[in-house]
């Protein structure tokens, strides 16, 4: 019998779905919506304060260029894969993965609005949601495939590194390969949201922490 072929992509399907959503939305933006996409679906603090709410979610699927979209798609694939595996590939786990991704992105946008009240700055891109995935992946990596506690030394060290990287971007005012100003505030907010929401999301997905190991009692012979 012929040996079964290994799949080309081993990434879990919820992560691949998110990659497809990012790149598919960018194709729609370029070939159908055009520059009008920024005005209609971008997010701004001023628009939010005026009652615009759709941008909280829709801005996650609008990007400033192909490099911007491709980098976020790559991040969603790299960091979304361990998160999707943890939550599970059944419909319940996939639904929690999607809700978690969107929640991190929305919270990142809300934090940006709080830090820039009334400003006309236009925010687009999935970076806040992707940094949420990075937050969960940080805890998973530190826990060897399971969620490590928030105050685990490895979690704290890696978190400091991610936050420090964004603060460097804040000082520089740009990131290599990207046009325009980088919303580092949304990145940090999304990352912190990901760290905090990973536990409740895993619980909703049906992931339970392993039972503590029972001590082995010595017996006299």
Image (tube, rainbow, N blue to C red):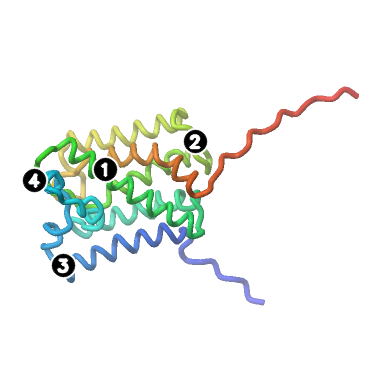
Q: Quadrant of residue 187?
A: top left
Residue wearing tag 2: 148
Toward the viewer: 193 or 69? 193
Query: CB under 8 Å between callouts 2 and 4?
Result: no
Mark 1 or mark 2, which is nearer the start of the sequence?
1
User: Which mark is first along the chain, 3 or 4?
Assistant: 3
Circle 4 sits on which residue?
120
Residue placed farthest to the top in the image?
220
Choose the circle earlier in sequence order: 2 or 4.
4
Report crowding for label 4: few under 14, some 14 to 19, many 20 or more residues within 10 A (C-alpha): few
**Residue 188: quarter of image:** top left
Q: Which comes before the other along the chain, label 3 or label 1?
A: 3
- Label 2, label 3: how far apart the Cα atoms are: 43 Å
Q: Which residue is drawn at 44% across and 32% down?
A: 150
**Given this view, does label 2 or label 4 mark the residue nearer the observer?**
4
Can you give x and y, in whole percent of width and height, for residue 44 in the image? Answer: 14, 47
Which one is closest to the eye, mark 2 or mark 1?
1
Residue, disc 1: 108
Residue 20, compared with residue 205, is above or below; it is below
Image: 6 above or below 95: below
Measuring 43% from the left and 42% from the top, which residue is drawn there?
A: 198
Camera-nearest residue between 71 and 132: 132
- Mark 4 and mark 3: Cα distance apart in space: 21 Å
Which mark is drawn over residue 117? none
At which x and y percent is residue 96? 43, 52
Q: Where is residue 83 in the image (x, y as percent from the top left)?
A: 45, 49
Between residue 77 and residue 210, name the one nearer to us.
210
Q: Which residue is drawn at 43% across and 56% down?
A: 95
User: Residue under circle 3?
Assistant: 33
């Amino acid at each position: 019998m012929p040996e079964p072929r290994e799949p080309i992509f081993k990434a879990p399907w919820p992560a691949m779905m998110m990659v497809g959503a990012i790149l598919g939305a960018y194709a729609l933006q370029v070939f159908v919506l055009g520059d009008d996409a920024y005005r209609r679906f971008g997010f701004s603090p001023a628009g939010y304060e005026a009652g615009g709410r759709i941008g909280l979610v829709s801005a996650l699927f609008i990007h400033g260029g192909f490099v911007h979209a491709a980098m976020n798609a790559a991040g969603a694939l790299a960091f979304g894969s361990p998160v999707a595996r943890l939550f599970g590939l059944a419909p319940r786990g996939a639904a929690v993965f999607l809700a978690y991704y969107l929640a991190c992105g929305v919270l990142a946008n809300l934090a940006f609005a709080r830090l820039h009240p009334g400003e006309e700055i236009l925010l687009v891109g999935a970076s806040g949601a992707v940094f949420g995935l990075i937050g969960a992946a940080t805890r998973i990596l530190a826990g060897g495939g399971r969620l490590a506690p928030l105050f685990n030394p490895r979690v704290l060290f890696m978190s400091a590194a991610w936050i420090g990287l964004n603060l460097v971007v804040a000082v520089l005012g740009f990131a290599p390969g990207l046009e325009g100003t980088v919303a580092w505030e949304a990145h940090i907010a999304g990352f912190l949201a990901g760290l905090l929401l990973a536990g409740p999301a895993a619980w909703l997905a049906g992931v339970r922490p392993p039972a503590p190991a029972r001590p082995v009692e010595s017996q006299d012979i």
